[in-house]
Each structure stands twice: as structure tokens, then as C-alpha cells.
Image (cartoon, helix red, strand yellow):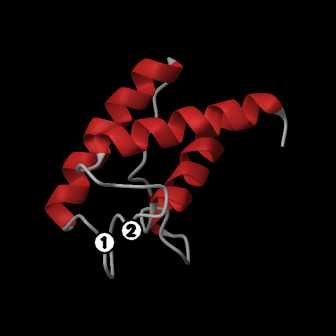
Amino acid sequence: MPPKIVTCKNSVRAIILESLPPGATGDSAIFGLGGMLDSLGLVSFLADLEYKLSEEFDQVVVLASEQAMSRSRSPFRDVSALTDYVAELLEK
């Protein structure tokens, strides 16, 4: 992976972890089976995360989109999946 993408993913992961409840780690489940957030918590988390990502990367980031919802595996299932998904959106 090029250094810029690694740096981006590290920044995204840090923002995600600071936006989740205390105790979240890189392996934490976010939503779904064993997830730390219910549906209302997920909506609030995503709104907060979109704002922080937009501030950090100076571009509009929309996480809850048709693209996200149509995936066979939810990008909101855990920290790693969400990090990869956000990095993918930022690269566009």
C-alpha cells in the first residue's frame, strides 16, 4: 500500500475509535451481532463521524448511502471494515 493510503487509513481508524464508546479497539464490532451500537446509536455515530471526517479531510463524506446499504457485507460491522470503507470513499 502506498504511504499516503496507509496514513489516511491510520487517521480514519483513529477518528472512528475516538467517535465510538470508550473501550473500543481496532477489532471492535460496531453494529450487528455483538456490536456495541444499536440502530439509533449507529445513526448518531455515523452523523458524528461524517462531520469529523469532513473536517479532517476537507471533503464531504456520506457514509449511509445506497452504495453502503447494497453491499453483501455491511461496512458498519466492525472498525476494520468501516476504516476500509471510509478510505475507499476518500480515494474517490
Give neighbour class at mark 1: few <14, some 14-19, many 20+ (Cα, 10 Å): some
The residue indicated by pointer 2 is 29
- Of the two numbered discs 1 and 2 on the same chain, state the one appearing first in sequence: 2
Asked whether the residues under the numbered discs 1 and 2 touch, taking CB atoms below 8 Å apart as contact, a structural biologist would say yes
Q: Tell me if residue 92 can be seen.
A: no
Q: Secondary structure at mark 1?
A: loop
At 43% from the left edge and 53% from the top edge, which residue is drawn?
65
Q: Is residue 22 above or below residue 53?
A: below
Residue type at tag 1? Gly
Q: Nearer the viewer, residue 82 or 63?
A: 82
Q: Secondary structure at mark 2?
A: loop
Distance between mark 1 and mark 2 Cα atoms = 4 Å
Q: Looking at the picture, how far across and down is residue 51, in whole percent? A: 33, 29
Q: Nearer the viewer, residue 56 or 69?
A: 56
Q: Looking at the picture, how far across and down is residue 33, in whole percent? A: 33, 82
At 31% from the left edge and 47% from the top edge, which residue is drawn?
46
Residue that lies at the very extreme toward the left in this rendered image? 40
- Say which mark, if any, is on residue 35: 1
- Say which mark, if any, is on residue 20: none
Q: Quadrant of the N terminus?
A: top right
**38 left or right, relative to 62:** left
Q: Nearer the viewer, residue 75 or 21?
A: 21
Residue type at tag 2? Ala
